[in-house]
Structure formats: C-alpha cells, structure tokens
Amino acid sequence: MKKMRFLPKLGRGGKIVRNLVLVAGLALVIWAQYGCPLPTIDMEFRRMERKNLLPPSEIVLHTGQITVSHSHDPGVPPPKITEEQILGLGEDYAVAFWKHPFSTSGNQLACWSFAEQPGQVKLVPLLYTISDTRDKDWPERESCAAVATLQLPEGTVRGEMTVEAEEGIYQEESQVLEHGLCLFAFQSRLDSYSGDWVQGLPYTLRLYDAAGKLLLEQTGTVPVRA
Amino acid sequence: MKLDKGLMAGSSTMLVLTLLESGDMYGYQMIEELSRRSNQVFQMQEGTLYPILHTLEKGKYLSSYEQQAPTGRMRKYYKLTRKGRELLGEKKSEWEKFHSGVEAVLSFS
Amino acid sequence: MERNYVSEYEWLNAATRGIRFKPDRMAVREELFAHLEDKQADLRRIFPDMTRGEAERRALESMGDPEALGRELAKIHKPWLGYLWVASRWAAVLAALAIAASILLGGTWLEDVRWRVEDWLDNSESAAVSQALYGDGQPQWEGERLAVYAPEAEARLGRCTISVPRAAMWEEQGKNVLYLELRLSYDLPWERSEAPLSYLWAEVDQRNGYGERQGYTSRGHRQMGLRWVSINMMVEDVPRDLEYVTLHYLPGTKLDLRVDLKEVAA
C-alpha cells in the first residue's frame, strides 16, 4: 500500500533549507529577547545616542581598556576596570555610557552639561567595578568611583586629584590618556559606600607638564548626577 | 548474447528511461523486463544498473518510493518524472539520428 | 580480478563501503540486498536442484565486481548534503531549546510584551488624563477645566519630530495646572522609544517671576502608535494668563521649542 502524503514532499535539500530558515527565525527571536544586542560596544553606544535623540559625540574613552595606574597595596597588581563603558564628548556636554553585561535594556546613558561647570577643566564622574584580588580565594567585585577630566590645558602630562570626604582626604594620580584626558580612579572608600561617593565632594585638581611644572590648579565640587 | 560493452553503455540510460515510460519498476524487475523485451539480446550487467538509476534519481529525472513486496520486504520503485520524460525524448531523437546515420553508411555502396 | 566472496554480507560491504553517510549507505545496501535475493529466488525457481550456496555465488557473480560498483556509488552518494541535513536538524532542535531557555530565564522582549498588555488593560488612568485634554468629562480628581489650547508647536530632533498637539489648563485644589500632550513621531517604526520623554522639561514664561520648572511625566499615561509615542506632561502652579512655555531637552541638543498657548473652544 502506498504511503499517503499530506504535506508537499520536500527533498533533502528542501528540508535543509527549511531547517536553516527555522534556525534563523528562532535565532532572531532569541536575539530580540535580549534586546537586540549589537556586536560592538561602540555600536551600542551610537544606538543609545540615537535613541535619546542626541547627535553623535566624539568617543574619548573606552574604560574597558584601561588599567588603573597604580595599586594601593604593594605587591598586588593594579585593578583593571572590568566593565565596558564609553565616554563621548559633545560640544558642551559629555555622555557616559554603561553597558549592561546581558540585556540591552539595562544599558545606561548619563548626560553631563558643561555649561553648569564653572572651571576650565570639566569633570565627569563615572562608576566602575573592579575585582578585588587581594583575597585570592574570594575575589570580590566592588563598585568604585572615577572622575574623568576633560579640556585640560595643553601640555598636561599628569594630574593629581584630591577629594575631601568626612573622614579624610583621598588622592589619586593619572597620566594623560589618549584624547587628552585624565581618569582618576578612586578605589573604594569603605565597604559600605556605593560607587558614587565621590559625587558632591569638594576636590582639588593639579595638572603638571612634562617638566613637572604646575600648569593648573582647580577647585570645586564634583558634579552630582541629577 | 552479450553485446559490445561500448554500444551498451551509451544507450543504457535511454533503455532504463524507456522501461519506466510504461510504468514504475524496481531494479531487478527492470533487468528482467529488458531481457524479455529484447528477446534475451540485452543482458545488462546487473551491477551497472544501480549507478544509472541513482544518478538519474539524483538529477531529478526519476523519483522513487517504497512499496512492500509479497515476501514482506520493502522494494524501491522508480518512477519517471516530467523532467525524465523530456530527457527520454531527447535521447530518443539522438538515437534516431545515430541510427539513420549508421543505416545510411551501411547501405551506401 | 575476481575475488571469491564468502557471503552476500561481505559483498555488500565492499559495494557500499564508499558511501560515507550512514542512512544513505543503509538504503543502498537494502536495495542491492533485495536485488540479490530476487536473483537467487529466480535461479532456484529455474534450477530447482541448485543449492542455496550455489545460488548465492551465482547471484553475486552476475552482479559483478563490488569494488568497481562501490567506486561508482561513492561518486554518486556524496555525504556532504547528508551531513548538512543532520547538522541542520540538530541546529533547529538546539534553537528551539534555546528559545525555551531564554523565555524561562526572562529576556526583555517578553517583558515588553507583558508591560504593553498590562498597560492596555489598565486604561483608567490614561483615560482620565486624556479626558483632561480631549474629553468633556471630569478627570477622576476634583478640578475645573479653565481652558483648552491647540498649540502648533513642532520641532525636529534626530530622526524624530516632537510636537505638542494639545494642552489644557485646569484648576485643582486652588492651583493652576497646565497639561501638555507631548508627542514623539519617529521616521521609522523600530526607532520608536519612550526614553526621550523623561528628559523633556518645560520652562515657564518668566514674566510673572516664575522660574524654570520641570515638567512631570508619567509612564502610566503613555499612549503609543506604530511610530509614535505620546505622554501627558503636567506643569504645576502656573499663572492663569500664561502665554507660552518653552520645551527643552538634554544639554547637547539645544531644543528651544516655544509652545504658544492659543486658546480654542473645547
């Protein structure tokens, strides 16, 4: 007795095509599930800018590529900034973009206006996470504060920044990075403080040239995210 | 009588297609049928049949299906497709030309 | 060169060895085996005295050299399509499993769908505030509508057109409240986003000494179309004779959209 066929007969080639189309369709759904993540962080950043109707800014910092310049404990390697963040520079503002590891809906964009900052050097507070490798058995991830400084005077080679907290003064150093900015990464003050502790504190910034001469000293208050 | 292999090979495809023109058949059946129709002139080497059938099926000149034989085993039947019929038509006209050419030479004297 | 094959089994092995993709190999093997069996049955029918072994030997002999046949068959039955087929089947199964897993683990797409359904079901609040702008009836809180405006304010930002099609002034609890309908119309459907709504703010005309104000927007009062998003912004404690407000956006965009409050009949 002949076998009855209810569906159109698909040769092996047809079945392969059908399966691959199915796979493509399902992959698309999965991709959409996670908020349509794009391949590079730059693309995600640009998309975020468009989503917020901002004109494309100049990318001046990829924090994922930066190592904090020195470590507080001797013998322990300085921490690397583990997250992918981007700092973009516009005409009179900066945008800080933070990429969520899994879901694009967790991505964040913070806009900092320079018009509200009186000094020559503009500050942009950033948050970052480091793996604390001091305890090798149980490396912890901590949220830390960083301050990016932009529009530095010509010839700046390194900088020092101090912030005044209740219990004392914290000081960090930074070399000038590509695109002419300094990034001061303040490691965690006390375990209980969240990464934005630097915001709102009085600061003093000193910038030096190659010969060690002081180019600029600026004081003010670290801007707070609205 | 076993004919010259050279002559056989070229026309094997055409013979297989012609057999299937009159109905679906399975491999062994085709060998038998060919022998019967040609009055035992053509005894196709059995082993050469299957490469021909599979090649034709791959080229979509034939399609196949399985049907259960009285012995209980499944037999693979071959069926001529429309594309196969077209090929048969071409082969037949090729053969006609060849045939009349040979005739012409033989009767020339 | 004729080898004396001991059995059909060996012969079949030799003839099909070159077919690498197993399902194909088995199918061809079946077909050849059926042929050999038919041949043997025939021989024994014609020569009733023939032994099984003899019939087998003759059948194999008339099939010919299995190595040669094997080479031909190997050329025809290339395994690549077979492998691709199996691979594509696995891929389809894995993709289906991945979808199931990602749904369980919770991705954003399903969440979005859920929120939208919830919003759509939860119509009451947005109806109330739309009533404030468009309807005749009272919103659910006490107040009196003082005026309705049809400002023709429109500005372009990125690939989006921001407009304020409608506004209304209400008196609530002794204060004047201005409601503005903010509408974002996007060029392309997939660019539609609510994100900008939370960054829009209104600066109130300073004639009477009122300073800058933030406009209040709420997600629950959001309405959407294929390419647009609309929300109601509330500006509290404004003067009754307010002539216009100015809409601003994020620092880098320099949006100064003047929204003239032109009164119209409700």
Image (cartoon, rainbow, N blue to C red):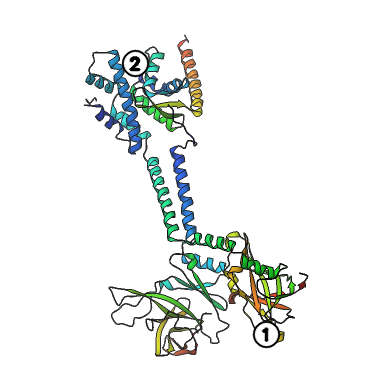
Residue flagged by tag 2: what amino acid is it? Lys
Q: Position of residue C79 (x, y in %)?
A: 36, 39
Q: Could you give the CA–CA distance between mark 1 and mark 2, rounded to whole angstroms? A: 113 Å
Is residue C247 shown left or right of residue B107?
Answer: right
Farthest top residue in view? B109
Kind of residue at disc 1 = Tyr
- Could you tell whether A86 is left or right of C173 in the image? left
Which residue has dot 2 on it?
B2
At 64% from the left and 82% from the top, the residue drawn is C212
Considering only vertical position in the picture, is A67 above or below B24? below
Please name whichever residue, A158 or C136, is drawn nearer the observer in this view of the structure: C136
Residue C73 lies in what quarter of the image? Answer: top left
Residue C182 in view, yes or no: no
Residue C12's x, y, as percent? 28, 30
Question: What is the chain letter for disc 1?
Answer: C
Task: Judge by depth and name the residue closer to the eye, A206 or C239.
Answer: C239
Q: Chain of mark 2?
A: B
Q: Are marks 1 and 2 in contact (CB under 8 Å)?
A: no
Q: Is residue A216 visible?
A: yes
- Residue A141 quadrant: bottom left
Q: Nearer the viewer, mark 1 or mark 2?
A: 1
Determine the residue positioned at 73% across, 68% down: C136
Residue C38 drawn at (x, y percent): 32, 21
Q: Position of residue C82 (x, y in %)?
A: 38, 40
Do the residues indicated by labels 1 and 2 lie within the same chain of the protein? no
Instruction: Pick out the residue farthest to the right.
Output: C265
Toward which corner of the image does residue A1 lie, by quadrant?
top left
Residue A158: image tag: none
Crowd band around label 1 with a 10 angstrom C-alpha radius: few (<14), some (14–19), many (20+): few
> Residue C210: which numbered mark, if any?
1
At numbered mark 1, what does the secondary structure look like: helix, strand or loop?
A: loop
In the picture shown, does residue B43 fall above or below C30? above
